[in-house]
Amino acid sequence: MDDGGSSYRGPARLLHWLVALLVLATIPVGLTMAGDDVSRSLRDTLYLFHKNTGVLILLLVACRLAYRIAHPAPPLPTSMPAWQAAAARATHGALYTLLVVMGLSGYVYVKAGGYPIEVLDALGVPPLVPRSDVISGVAESIHVSAWMVLIALIAVHVAAALHHGIVRRDGVLWRMRPW
């Protein structure tokens, strides 16, 4: 299968799939921990996982952005319609933006709410926001709203990748293959 002669480099692929797997792991965890029928013990475990995985995702996204600046994405196939190329750029930009918004709003929601983020606390990172129920509530609203948009964009991203891999067979899907 032709990849248009322009696959992503190994580090970009590794970061992509690490972020994708971690994001996909946090989605059901987030939904479950917010449920009413969850035991306190399970909820605490899920919050612990969700918060600390969120920190890891934010750090990996920062690495991805830095890597992307140093190593721009390979060009899209010239056979791709201009509107699809523009939609791909917009979707990627929105995904990066939402991942950052999710990480930062999650951090503010938890820390302004007076709760720990264990991995950061263990590293001695002081809270970067004051304790405030108002700030925590606004951050929670942002986190939940961004989550809904992020889910929709992930669905669009996956559908577009599959369209290019199965229908168009233009090599776009294979540019980010994990191997």
Image (cartoon, rainbow, N blue to C red):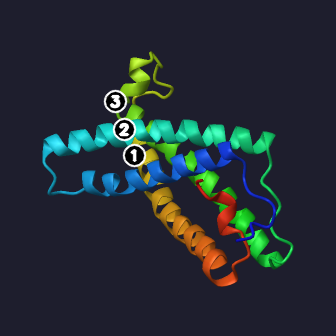
Ranked by sequence position, the earlier of labels 2 and 3 is 3
Q: Which residue is mark 1?
A: 137
Is there a contact, CB below 8 Å, between mark 2 and mark 1?
A: yes
| Residue tagged 3 | 114
Residue 165 makes an appearance in the image: yes
Label 3 with label 1: CB-CB less than 8 Å: no
Q: Three-letter amino acid code at disc 2?
A: Asp
Q: Residue at x 21, y 45 (%)?
A: 43
Figure quadrant of the N terminus: bottom right
Secondary structure beneath disc 3?
A: loop
Image position, residue 87 (x, y; %): 72, 71
What separation in Å lies between label 2 and label 3 (alpha carbons)? Answer: 9 Å
Whether label 2 touches label 3, CB < 8 Å: no
Which residue matches tag 2? 133
Question: What amino acid type should be assigned to the residue bearing mark 1?
Answer: Gly
Q: Is residue 72 above or below residue 107?
A: below
Q: Residues within 10 Å of mark 1 (few under 14, many from 20)?
A: some
Secondary structure under tag 1 reads helix
Of marks 3 and 1, which one's residue comes earlier in the chain?
A: 3
Local crowd size for mark 2, using a 10 Å CA cut-off: few (<14), some (14–19), many (≥20): few
| Left/right of residue 156 with respect to residue 108 in the rendered view | right
Where is residue 4, by image quadrant? bottom right
